[in-house]
Amino acid sequence: MMHARVSRTLLLLSGVTAIIAVTPLAYLLVRVLDAGPAKVWSALVRMRTLETAITSVALAATVIVMCVAIGVPIAWALARVRVPWAAAWSVLLALPLAIPSYVAAYAWLAEFSAMTGFWAAAFVLTLVSMPYVIIPTTVAFRNADAGLEEVARTLGRGPWGTFWSASMPQAWPATAAGALLVGLYVLSDFGAVALFRVDAFTRVIYASYRGSFDRTTAAVLAVVLVMLALLLILAERRVRGRTSRWRVGSGSSRRAAALRLSTWQTTAVVIGLTTVAILAIVFPVFSLIRRLLEGSRRPLDWGELAQAALNTLGVSTLAAIVVVILALPVGILAARSQARSVRVLEAASYTGHALPGVVVGLSLVFFTLLVLPAIYQTLAALVLAYTILFLPKSIGATRTAVAVVPPALEQTARTLGFGPLAAWSRTTLRLATPMVAAGGLLVCLTAMKELPATLMLRPTGFDTLATELWSRTEIAAYGASAPYALALMVLAAVPAWLLSWASERRASTVHTGASHDRVPMPATVDW
């Protein structure tokens, strides 16, 4: 049991986090209601609004289907097949996380200037979103109970039957969670849809914000986009169902033996992995390097590039620290308590899960101008936006990290004379720190790539690699953009590699502990 005083303190801190998280959405709703029914209805019933909604939903659905269709076979190959250089492939196929959609779009446009429209955006978004499915599904396949597959084979199921009846049901919660992240990523994407001239909600909202003095339409469209994201979250929960999977026998869980394929089958798998890696990683890097070597009319200002890199690293690191601090009380309570108040606070803190960057940026522009003008276009406003957007990533990592630590360890420390805080810090905190840090790394990585909120809220004269790249790409100055794109990829590759390494290490150690007759097997990874 959690100490009463500690629990009250955590509830108070969680309440602060929840208030921060819901502020943009609450203020946006207030602004829409203040506009009056006539203006809101006029913005909703326009034909362009319907077309934008259809385009956004169709793009998200297309990318989800493509990511699952490609990501699940790749995850199966990495987890269950003897593939040459398996560890290297796992790291390599996680690296698209370090490539923002607008960088990938820029790389393809630099080589194929006629590439535009819906399918171009779907293709590029699929390439950069696949790790959201590949990484958790690979972990789930590795952690799957081999006993279920053995039962399926004894019942006469062949390889395909065993896969669909025994293996895939165990991995499905992780795959569904990854598909949810893909859908939310596509709905919130601004860079790729803008560069490929696709009228999705994010592009239309940004255009309404920048091009009109009456921003009611932008606010109404932002609320509609949030509703679409919430519907996607509810649909994922309905499809995924329960995330707990239980073992069928006693004793410790064990991995299924890796499959040894024939030479031609192994060759086919390697060719498939190589093709995906070339399209998602090698080609963008090749395009950027080629443009860099070609040069541009404007000579590169190394001081400007270094300053943009320092700004990017500094603000993303600051945001990660703030997010981890705010996420700790919520994640701890969510892992240790089933109280209704805790569930409400956790749900409120997850508001950023359904808020695209353009929506948070727009709402904080309104909010800071009218309520907190002192922080308008300051670093505080930008960090606040990152905090709201990326809180769910850190809360999920913290909740998972604390949940897998047995409460009995804290109780044992208490019997040895330690106080509540000392017992918690010597047991739960020490064991949970690596995964909490991984959540912070993910926040840092995602903040580096965030574009629309940064464009709207950054202080005057404060440029990041993303904004410098965008300002040049908008005018098709591909040669001048290349150094900034490469620098952003290199900078983001560090946390992406660390996340992949942490995932591999977690997957390799999950079977080392003792098991009981009914051991809940982790089905999802909070990416």
Image (cartoon, rainbow, N blue to C red):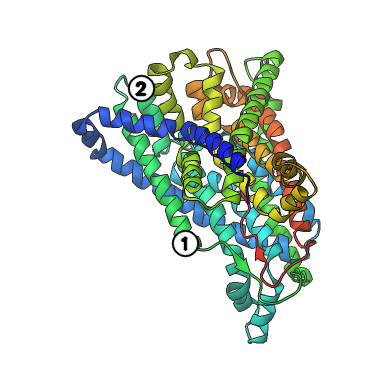
Residue on which disc 1 sits? 239
Q: What residue appears at the point 34 percent right and 31 percent down from the top-left corner?
A: 219
- Which residue type does callout 1 highlight? Val
Circle 2 SS class: helix
Q: Position of residue 495 (x, y in %)?
A: 71, 38
Looking at this view, name the residue that lies furthest to the left.
Answer: 38
Q: Nearer the viewer, residue 513 or 477?
A: 513
- Residue 526 versus residue 294 in the image, above or below: below
Q: Position of residue 87 (x, y in %)?
A: 78, 54
- Which residue type does callout 2 highlight? Gly
Q: Position of residue 427 (x, y in %)?
A: 76, 47
* Sequence-earlier tag: 1 or 2: 2
Question: Is residue 102 visible from the viewing direction of this image?
Answer: yes
Q: Position of residue 73 (x, y in %)?
A: 63, 62
Tell me where residue 315 sits by quadrant.
top right
Q: Nearer the viewer, residue 99 or 245?
A: 245
Q: What residue appears at the point 56 percent right and 25 percent down from the top-left corner?
A: 383
User: Label 2 neighbourhood size at 10 Å, few (<14), some (14-19), many (20+)?
Assistant: few
Real-space CA distance between mark 1 and mark 2, rounded to the nearest whole angstrom = 40 Å
- Residue 392 versus residue 504 in the image, above or below: above
- With 450 as the anchor, is 409 left or right in this view? right
Asked whether the residues under the numbered discs 1 and 2 touch, taking CB atoms below 8 Å apart as contact, a structural biologist would say no
Q: Nearer the viewer, mark 1 or mark 2?
A: 1
- With 198 as the anchor, is 173 left or right in this view? right
Q: Nearer the viewer, residue 186 or 115?
A: 186
Q: What residue appears at the point 55 percent right and 48 percent down from the top-left corner?
A: 126
Q: Nearer the viewer, residue 443 or 199?
A: 443
Residue on which disc 2 sits? 211
Circle 1 SS class: helix
Per the rendering, the mark at residue 116 is: none
Q: What residue appears at the point 25 percent right and 27 percent down from the top-left corner?
A: 35
Tell me where residue 198 sits by quadrant.
top left
